[in-house]
Amino acid sequence: MTTLGITINGRAYGPMEVRDELTMNDFLREMLGMTGTKFGCGAAQCLSCAVIIDNPDGTSYTSPTCIVPAASFDGKAIRTVEGHAKNGELSVLQKAFIDHFAFQCGYCTPGFLNEGQVLLERLAKTPVARAELEATIAEALDGHICRCTGYIKYHEAVRDVILADPKRYLV
Amino acid sequence: MESGMRVRTLVAAVALTTSMLTGYAASQTSANKLASPESFGAIGDADARSAAIFTELGKVLTHPRCVNCHPAGDRPHQANEGRLHQPPVERGADGRGLPAMRCSVCHQNANFDPGRVPGHPEWHLAPREMAWEGKTIGEICVQIKDPARNGGRRPEDLIHHIGEDTLVGWAWAPGYGRAPAPGTQKEAGALVEAWVKSGAICPVN
């Protein structure tokens, strides 16, 4: 058993004892009932299980949860798909996903949403040129697998959010 | 001219003999074990003995546990068959992954068998110049002696690196579903030491 204390979507959980072999995905879904984070391939290859990890310096990155021990998240602050909407209001990116009909079954959506959000926050700190935008989005979303709608609608949704506020995201 | 021919013939004969002895020595132990340095004592020629010892060590160096992270390209390999790493990842500038996909995101401080993920605090790829993939044991031997391609190490430094480095040691405790490297790390270290002290002679192939 290992002690785990973690902040999820701004709320502190623990410290609590968790089994050493418990994955982060099972911790979220089975222990906390936060089923928005999906279990897909179980091998970190589809990234439907990805969550956002917030570093103390204000930067963020995504991490799969299906192959990673829950205990390794001790002391970290993370965001899951449940944390994007505020007071019942969907985030800008969530609305863009809906507007573009970016998903059908929705199983991969939490991963794409988290990855897209990390990209938006990164561009807000370090904007890129318009000419680099398509490649930047493609690179950011690379690795996330969708079996329904294809990838272009996610790509277009992220792009539209950025182009709607070019002073914030582009140089 | 005649003398030159003699020398070349002698060199070829020594090389052939070394090669044969090397093959003989390496075949005396099963693939998952390592022969001791002492077991090569029957080889009278010192250079041939040194080369044979390295050939035995080559069972470790060419094992998937080692080669998978000494790839020729920018992507690590994985599993016992040495397939390309899935998910697709690349070495990045420092051998620890791209900024958006660092090795440590998945590879924790220790193996995590429930997720089938190996781990170590220093998990990273060997530098590109230290690639072993697709090379013969003889080629690896020449490379491992070259400071430009071995991380600036002297042959003596390899005794510690292979015999005691804990990331190298992971190869003998790789976790569920992965075949460990042959023998033990201590045995591999003993072979390196014997090879270095016997002149660090490389096998011809």
Image (spheres, rainbow, N blue to C red):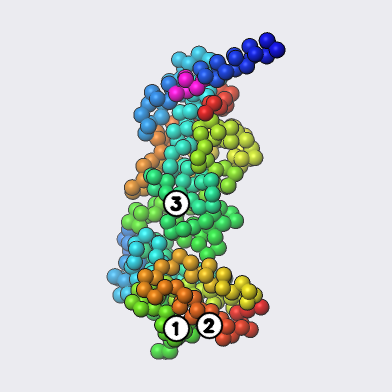
Left or right: A46 with respect to A31? right
Determine the CA span between mark 3 and mark 2.
Answer: 35 Å
Q: Main secondary structure of the magenta part?
A: helix
Chain letter for mark 2:
A
The numbered disc on residue B84 is: 3
Q: Which amino acid does label 3 sit on?
A: Leu
Q: Residues within 10 Å of mark 1 (few under 14, many from 20)?
A: some
Across and down, in percent, residue A13 comes to 38, 73
Image point (38%, 44%), residue name: B80
Could you tell me which quadrant the N terminus of chain B lies in?
A: top right
Q: What secondary structure is found at the residue carrying circle 1?
A: loop
In the rendered structure, does residue B22 fall within the stretch colored magenta? yes
Determine the CA span between mark 3 and mark 1.
Answer: 35 Å
Lower position in the chain sequence, tag 2 or tag 1: 1
Camera-nearest residue between A92 and B166? A92
Camera-nearest residue between B33 and A47? A47
From which residue to which does the magenta span run? B18-23
Q: Which amino acid does label 2 sit on?
A: Asp
Q: Which amino acid does label 1 sit on?
A: His
